[in-house]
């Protein structure tokens, strides 16, 4: 893996680790609004706007008017890799929800 690839991957992890970012990305499949994102993620509209801007800069969502949708890259990431990351994360936790 090149240094550029590691940097890009690190940036993606940083974006996706922010509160609400994964929830927003997951609901953006069929198109969603800022307000729907903030409700689904349990964050303020201001925070949702920031997360959407981050996801847009990363190429994971695109905005058309007031509607946000996953890009092809965002759909691939969600269908192939996010479930694996969630599984790996859950396997690393014990029954109390604490990391082992």
Image (spheres, helix red, strand yellow):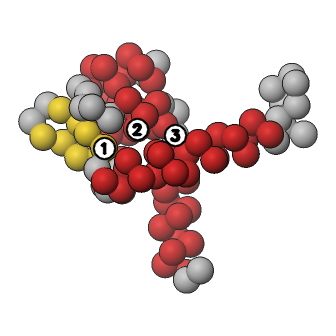
Which tag, 1 or 2, sits closer to the chain's start?
2
Residue linked to disc 3: 18
Q: CA distance from mark 3 to mark 2?
A: 12 Å
In the rendered image, is residue 89 in sight? yes
Query: 84 or 54, which lies in front?
Result: 84
Residue 23 horizontal/vertical position (percent): 46, 30
Q: Quadrant of the N terminus?
A: bottom right
Residue linked to disc 2: 25
CB atoms at circles 1 and 2 under 8 Å apart? yes
Determine which quarter of the picture holds residue 26: top left
Q: Is residue 80 above or below residue 32?
A: below
Front tag of 3 and 1:
1
The numbered mark at residue 70 is: 1
Q: Residues within 10 Å of mark 3 (few under 14, many from 20)?
A: few
Q: Residue at x 27, y 31 (%)?
A: 30
Determine which quarter of the picture holds residue 65: top left
In the rendered image, is residue 54 in sight? no
Q: CA distance from mark 3 to mark 1?
A: 17 Å
Query: 44 or 3, which lies in front?
Result: 3
Query: 65 or 27, which lies in front?
Result: 27
CB atoms at circles 3 and 2 under 8 Å apart? no
Q: Is residue 51 above or below residue 73?
A: above
Q: Residue at x 73, y 45 (%)?
A: 88
The secondary structure type at the circle numbered 1 is: strand
Which tag, 3 or 1, sits closer to the chain's start?
3
Residue 48 horizontal/vertical position (percent): 35, 30
The secondary structure type at the circle numbered 3 is: loop
């Amino acid at each position: 893996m090149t240094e550029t690839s590691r940097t890009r991957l690190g940036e993606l992890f940083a974006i996706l680790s922010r509160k609400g970012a994964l929830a927003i990305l997951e609901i953006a499949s069929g198109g969603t609004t800022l307000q729907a994102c903030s409700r689904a993620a349990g964050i303020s509209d201001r925070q949702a706007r920031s997360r959407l801007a981050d996801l847009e800069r990363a190429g994971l969502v695109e905005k058309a008017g007031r509607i946000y949708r996953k890009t092809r890259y965002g759909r691939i990431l969600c269908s192939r890799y996010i479930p694996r990351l969630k599984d790996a994360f859950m396997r690393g936790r014990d029954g109390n929800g604490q990391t082992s």
